Image: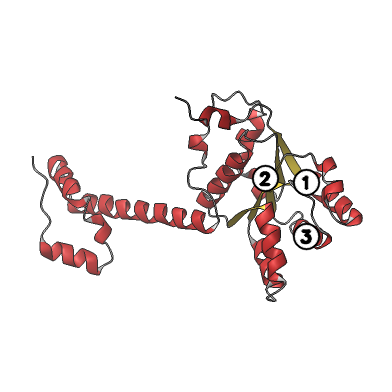
Amino acid sequence: MPPHSVSKDLERVLKSLKLGKLLPLLPERLRQFRERELSFEESLVILLSDEVQRRQSNRLVTRAKRANLAAELVFDSWDGTTDATYDRRLLDDLRLLKFLENHHHVLIMGPVGVGKTMLAHALGHLAIARDYSVHCESADKLFQRLRGSRLDDTHAAELRRLIGVDLLIIDDFGLRKLTETETADFFELVTARHQTASIVLTSNRDPAEWLPMLGDPLLAQAIVDRFSNNAYDLVIEGESYRKRQKPRL
């Protein structure tokens, strides 16, 4: 049976009601309604449910983009055949986001290329879907931006924004030594979010190795103590997954 055509009047009314996105799907939906002999009320529920689902999906995409989360780094893309070893039970528990509810942190440790960034972003996407506020940024860009914010007098506002989100994701922490100013900023973030909000942090280094990487020894000890004693440690061991992606003839 050919799809039911949509009249110009119906098209105009839907667009005026901001429901124009239903139009591409509408002919097929009308055909299905006729075949199944659905009532007007049943048909309307299905149509409006389509629109609600579309808007929710778009809202999640927009919020994920605003949070700096990579669209492709989700758990559906996680390769279970990888040779990397990790505590699967812990990861399953983290995916329930209980750590967010209880204001705990997550430290994802391991060598380069084993999927630390992917898991951090994937947890961020889950948090977005559960209506938590999220901000994700690499450590280098984060501290560089905070350093620059001191020049235009927006530093306090930037810190408030980073402290205020439900989940702060800091990627690739510990690749270089932080200055005293950067260490002070990190101390402010960790202290202000201690037992009030969660941080997911990825690093190649164990917290004990952070001490010489932080510019102020006293602040360094306070940071490590507050963060590590409130964090789940997800350790990933294995070779870089990027070897699989190397182009070959």
For residue 142, what is the image quadrant?
Answer: bottom right
Label of residue 240 in the image = none
Image quadrant occupied by the N terminus: top left
| Residue pictured at 27% horizontal, 52% vertical | 45
Which of 178/8 is in front?
178
Secondary structure of the residue carrying numbered label 2: helix
Residue bearing the label numbered 2: 99
Examine the rendered structure and indicate whether residue 165 appears above or below residue 203: below
Secondary structure of the residue carrying numbered label 1: loop
| Residue pictured at 62% horizontal, 30% vertical | 240
Say whether residue 223 is visible. Answer: yes
Q: Earlier in the sequence, mark 1 or mark 3?
A: 3
- Amino acid beneath label 1: Asn
Look at discs 3 and 2 and give the one toward the viewer. 3
Side (left or right) of 86 relative to 50: right
Residue bearing the label numbered 1: 230
Side (left or right) of 216 relative to 248: right
Q: Position of residue 51 (x, y in %)?
A: 31, 55
Looking at this view, name the residue that lies furthest to the right. 218
Looking at this view, name the residue that lies furthest to the bottom. 153
Say whether residue 96 is visible. Answer: no
C-alpha distance separating marks 3 and 2: 26 Å
| Residue pictured at 69% horizontal, 54% vertical | 140
Residue bearing the label numbered 3: 182
Image quadrant occupied by the C terminus: top left
Looking at this view, name the residue that lies furthest to the left. 1
Look at discs 1 and 3 and give the one toward the viewer. 3
Examine the rendered structure and indicate whether residue 82 appears above or below residue 189: above
Secondary structure of the residue carrying numbered label 3: helix
